[in-house]
Amino acid sequence: MDKIRDKKPHIAVIGDLMIDHYIWGQCERISPEAPVQVVEVKKESSVLGGAGNVINNLISLDASVSVYTVLGNDDNAAYVEGLLNSVNATCETIIKQDHRITSKKSRIIASNQQIIRFDDESKDDISLSAQSKLLESLSKNIFSYDAILLSDYGKGVLTTNLTQDIIQLANAHNKPVLVDPKGSDYSKYKGATLLTPNKKEASLATKIDIIDDASLLQAGVKLKNEIALEYAIITLSEDGIAIFDDNMNIIPTIAREVFDVTGAGDTVLASLGVAIASNLNIHEACEFANKAAAVVVAKVGSATVTLNEIEEYEHSLNKGQIESKIKDFKAIERIVTRLKTQKRKIIFTNGCFDILHRGHATYLQKAKDQGDILIVGVNSDESIKRLKGEDRPINNLEDRAYLLAALESIDFVVHFYEDTPYELIKIIKPHILVKGADYKGKEVVGSDIADEVQLIEFVDGKSTSSIIKKISQGSIC
């Protein structure tokens, strides 16, 4: 995740753009003129469709996006450009072609049920002149892109010749090309980095009925070899994502609730593009895409996903993945900002936690009981030596942080190098700062920052010092 945040990749999207237009209303009667429903219109809305949903997902994942497409010379084209400007997508090359109709799909929805859809569009291949202009512009700008995404909806922008020219240009400049394919003939995508068909689409393209792992492997290998892909990917809906490189690997789904799969394919393409453009390997990229899709299918309608939402979802899944709870200053600042917008009550405490024992566990559970999220600051090895002498710590920082993160009561662990956690507390600004009852009557570092300070009693006779004393005296076997 941090690789993606730090990279903020620049991605070119080439494909079919359209308007998804919705007419919302109520139906309470049948027309006397014909056996059809009469819909009383309540509102209308329009959003970017086709490749536009890929663009929206890329931008919500903090990528910068340059758009290449061909539209008609009509009012709908102007509306598409307005929608692109509203999400801060850069229109590197949008060509207007006379006598071409910009795609608009209108859906009439009554009582939350779609009654009919009518399309106004051109589906013929774009002109040779338009193809040439797109390729020329891409060639001029390709050095600035970290990846190229082809979003093919079969509306004529990604012609066979143009698609092949784009792939060859990208390969010559070592730029990954990711494709959401259309139709059953994938030969026009030959040489791409990867394709992202679902199981049904892959079956049609390979003419292999995918019914089990053996047929899935056969289809994936055929797809990879015949289309000369670096990787083949087949999305398996509730079963996850299958990757074909040297072997077949299936990354299982992690979605816990599924409300609507609309647009999930666009989310997978966008999240794979962002991950690969940020130098994640294919398996890391697919795991990231799986998590992004899991967030999206829990929403209603063609939805987008943010890095914060994926990070929060990861955290909800990672109760057993201890390392995921260990954060640095930069990450915890971002997490705290998100948690505060959700009105979560944040608790902070700190210590050396050199030899973790029952007293620590009891203290930390009592701290967690004060609110929603417990963040623990842990001293670095160097700061412990300064505070307690050269013979401490007994356990190094990595081990101490890991053991703390293994406790269910703790949500996040952050280490600090200073003698006090003041700089860390300034970042977190906790609602409650927790310290031991031995601080009664003493100044608590960070009390000027936290909303409240709570002092908690320790368990009698349980301390790191007493354990070390017993060991040194040979009292513990």
Image: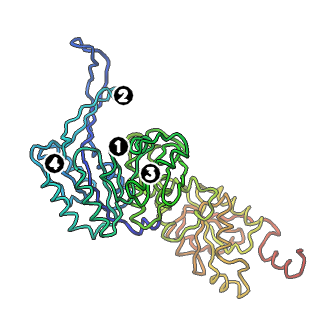
Which badge, 2 or 3, is on the more N-terminal residue? Answer: 2
Residue appearing at x 21%, y 48% in the figure: 80
Task: Residue 203 in the image: state x and y as whole percent.
Answer: 43, 42
Residue annotated with mark 1: 184
- Mark 4 or 1, closer to the camera: 1
Which badge, 2 or 4, is on the more N-terminal residue? Answer: 4
CA gap between label 4 and label 3 equals 42 Å
Task: Residue 86 in the image: state x and y as whole percent.
Answer: 25, 53
Vertical position of residue 207 compared to residue 172: above or below: above
Task: Residue 7 in the image: state x and y as whole percent.
Answer: 39, 68
Vertical position of residue 197 compared to residue 113: above or below: below
CA gap between label 2 and label 4 equals 30 Å
Residue appearing at x 55%, y 61% in the figure: 431
Answer with left or right where residue 165 lies relative to residue 257: left
The residue type indicated by label 3 comes to: Lys
Residue annotated with mark 2: 113
Residue 78, disc: 4
Figure quadrant of the C terminus: bottom right
Residue 222, disc: 3
Pointer 1 and pointer 2: residues touching (CB < 8 Å)?
no
Within-10-Å neighbours for mark 4: few <14, some 14–19, many 20+: some
Pointer 4 and pointer 3: residues touching (CB < 8 Å)?
no
Instruction: Report if residue 339 is visible in the image.
Output: no
